[in-house]
Image: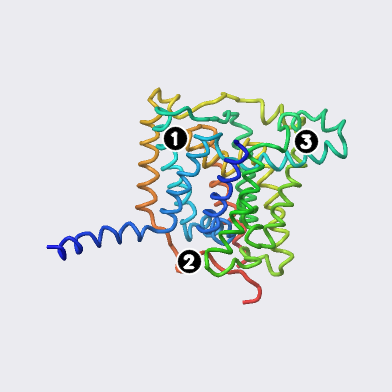
Amino acid sequence: MSLVYALLVGIAMGALIQRVGASSPRMILASLRLENTAIMKFMAVTIAVGTVAVYVLSYFIPMHFDIKPTYVVGVVVGGLIFGTGFAVGGYCPGTCVVGVGEGRRDAIGAVLGGVAGALVFTLIYTLIETPLIKPMNYGKVTLYGLLHLPPVIVAIAVSAVLFAGSALLPTVTRRSIGGRDFSPTR
Amino acid sequence: MTNATITTELPARRSVVSLPPWASLGILFGLVSTAAIALYGPIGVSGTYPRLIGAAMRRVAPAYAAANPYLVKMGSLITPETMLVVGLLIGGFLAARLSGAPSAPAMEYVHANETTSSRRWWNAFLGGVLIVFGARLAGGCTSGHIISGITQLAVSSILFGAAVFGSGMLTARLIKGGR
């Protein structure tokens, strides 16, 4: 049954990513250049709604939480490498799959690159496990655990900050809505 | 009397309809990610790439696949996450076809060095290598770490999100130099 739920969640997620423009590399670069922050606001609102919803629901039904471990070195180095690739290609591991679905040719390149990246990671895993993944592993740390507060209180506070930031900060900071066009044909 | 009620109701309705797309679609995505955690578990994508490698290795080099601790840890390709990735493909296809909006361009050129379509393609490929390698090192990507991780208030995911946007903005600025 989980497989069916996940397929339906994936279809909804793919459609939302396509409609908001997150599968467009130009929109991603416009976000990273702070020219058009619509995609960042989309993510902020997603988190703001989700965090309150999951912790309120947790009072009524069992939730399938899965907190990722905080191994500081690997998480930060991985994030820095990810950010570089995010800016170079304009895709993330999910948006390139959506991009293939909507017919983007460079999205196929990003997916194939992703397969190559996973192959390299798999081949060198035993070499990087000791220096990058094992050190400074604090386990499943949460913000509410650190603050010794009920999860729902922290969720409401985080949500308020994200909503306020999205509502108050400008979306379009340059006239080129959706980012600059580097197309060689123009 | 009836006129008065209509005129007072209209502006309220309009303000709901006129939410910017990032807000209305973000609310929907927040509900979808909540539904996933309620039904089976947080959304995630990037683990599918090494699981695909594992499925291929078990066919062509079963001894290596059984000996590699990472492939053993990631396990079978038959998981909810794989189905979610299949869903992304279908959802992207359907939304592009059914929305009535003009279809996506086959390529978007985002850097000054992308003077030919093949240069753009290789930038996307290189980006793909880095995002999946980085995501596997960190244990998640935009979906697993930034969206569902911060939704669950995980400290690792907040660290990951800060690192991603920090290096992403810096890289975007450094590449910009060409024009």
Q: CA distance from mark 2 to mark 3?
A: 42 Å
Residue at 74%, 47% in the rendered image: A115
User: Which residue position holds label 1?
Assistant: A54
Q: Position of residue B63 (x, y in %)?
A: 87, 30
Q: Quadrant of the N terminus of chain A?
A: top right
Q: Position of residue A2 (x, y in %)?
A: 60, 36
Chain letter, disc 2 residue: A
How many other residues sit within 10 Å of disc 1, few (<14), some (14-19) or many (≥20)? many
Q: Secondary structure at mark 2?
A: loop
Amino acid under label 3?
A: Ile
Q: Residue furthest bottom?
A: A186
Amino acid under label 1?
A: Val
Amino acid under label 2?
A: Ile
How many other residues sit within 10 Å of disc 3, few (<14), some (14-19) or many (≥20)? few
Count of marks overlaid on the render:
3
Residue at 36%, 31% in the rendered image: A153
Q: Do the dots labelled 1 and 2 sit on one chain?
A: yes
Give the label on residue B102, or none: none
Q: Is residue A37 left or right of residue B74?
A: left
Q: State the residue in front, A140 or B17.
A: B17
Q: Earlier in the sequence, mark 2 or mark 3?
A: 3
Q: CA distance from mark 1 to mark 3?
A: 37 Å
Q: Position of residue A142 (x, y in %)?
A: 48, 28
Report if the CB atoms under discs 1 and 3 are less than 8 Å apart.
Answer: no
Give the label on residue A177, or none: 2
Chain letter, disc 1 residue: A
Tell which tag, 1 or 2, sits nearer the viewer.
1
User: Which residue position holds label 3?
Assistant: A124
Q: Quadrant of the C terminus of chain A?
A: bottom right
Q: Do the dots labelled 1 and 3 sit on one chain?
A: yes
Q: Is residue A168 left or right of residue A7?
A: left
Q: State the residue in front, A113 or B7.
A: B7
